[in-house]
């Protein structure tokens, strides 16, 4: 199979902002001729920044799942529900579709995204040559689905806005909402800071 020359081998670099392919600058801090952004062969400190963001997301995800996401007040009685207890409630009430959507968006996706990012980071650090195309696809999938984790926050926001019946019934956002939003935002930044080209570097250097 004929190997194709890479942009680095051809002396080219891709602008991170406007995606223009330009010649590698002679000095360390060259700028893109189209948008003026600084040019880098690889994102600076990609692994260190991604690891820091992933660790922060792991810390935030613990209170996000243990603390109440919603606090419901009905005739003076309060009930606090976590993400999982909310899923169980919808299942018991027969709303399997809603329970499935909340579980996938608020439980499965965040944990899967963190697992994939950790796997990618470890594979790059240990210079693994295992299935680079599949790992690149996993990274693209992580970038794509990350924002949909905000579904639970949207549901809570809508409920808080709609259910305001004075002393009869009311729904308030619990402390977990802040931590969960932080998990989603931090993991989105983590995926953005990771440079998928690092997956291929070890393979190209070993050829």
Image (cartoon, rainbow, N blue to C red):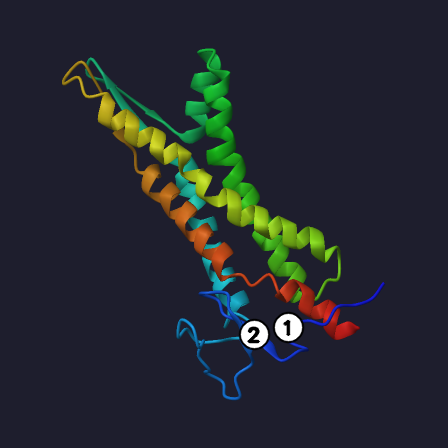
Viewer-side residue, 159 vs 26: 26
Please state the horizontal and vertical placement of residue 128, each as a whole percent of the image.
Answer: 72, 62
Please state the horizontal and vertical placement of residue 133, each as a whole percent of the image.
Answer: 70, 54
Of labels 2 and 1, earlier in sequence is 1
In-image side of 84 versus 202 (left or right): left
Q: Which residue is mark 1?
A: 7
Reply above or below: 120 against 13.
Answer: above
- Please tell me which residue is depicted at 52% across the width and 45% down the height of the picture: 144
In-image side of 162 versus 197 (left or right): left
Viewer-side residue, 182 vs 22: 22
Give the quarter of the figure containing the C terminus: bottom right
CB under 8 Å between discs 2 and 1: yes
User: Dot 1: within a 10 Å radius of its alpha carbon, few (fewer than 14), some, or many (20 or more) residues?
Assistant: some
In-image side of 168 versus 4 (left or right): left
Q: Is residue 68 visible?
A: no
Q: Which residue is mark 2?
A: 13
- Please tell me which residue is depicted at 53% across the width and 61% down the height of the picture: 194
Q: CA distance from mark 2 to mark 1?
A: 6 Å
């Amino acid at each position: 199979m004929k190997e194709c020359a890479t942009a680095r081998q051809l002396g080219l670099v891709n602008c991170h902002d406007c995606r223009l392919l330009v010649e590698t600058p002679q000095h360390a801090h060259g700028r893109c001729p189209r948008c003026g952004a600084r040019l880098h062969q690889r994102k600076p400190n990609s692994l260190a920044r991604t690891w820091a963001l992933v660790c922060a997301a792991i810390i935030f995800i613990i209170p996000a799942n243990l603390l109440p996401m919603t606090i419901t007040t009905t005739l003076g009685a309060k009930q606090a529900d976590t993400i999982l207890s909310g899923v169980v409630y919808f299942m018991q009430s027969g709303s399997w579709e809603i329970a499935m959507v909340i579980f996938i968006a608020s439980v499965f996706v965040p944990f899967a995204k963190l697992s994939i990012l950790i796997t990618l980071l470890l594979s790059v650090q240990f210079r693994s040559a295992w299935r680079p195309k599949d790992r690149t696809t996993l990274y693209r999938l992580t970038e794509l689905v990350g924002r949909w984790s905000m579904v639970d926050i949207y549901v809570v926001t809508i409920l808080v806005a709609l259910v305001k019946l004075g002393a009869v019934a009311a729904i308030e956002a619990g402390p977990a909402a802040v931590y969960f939003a932080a998990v989603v935002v931090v993991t989105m930044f983590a995926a953005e800071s990771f440079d998928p080209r690092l997956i291929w570097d070890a393979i190209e250097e070993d050829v």
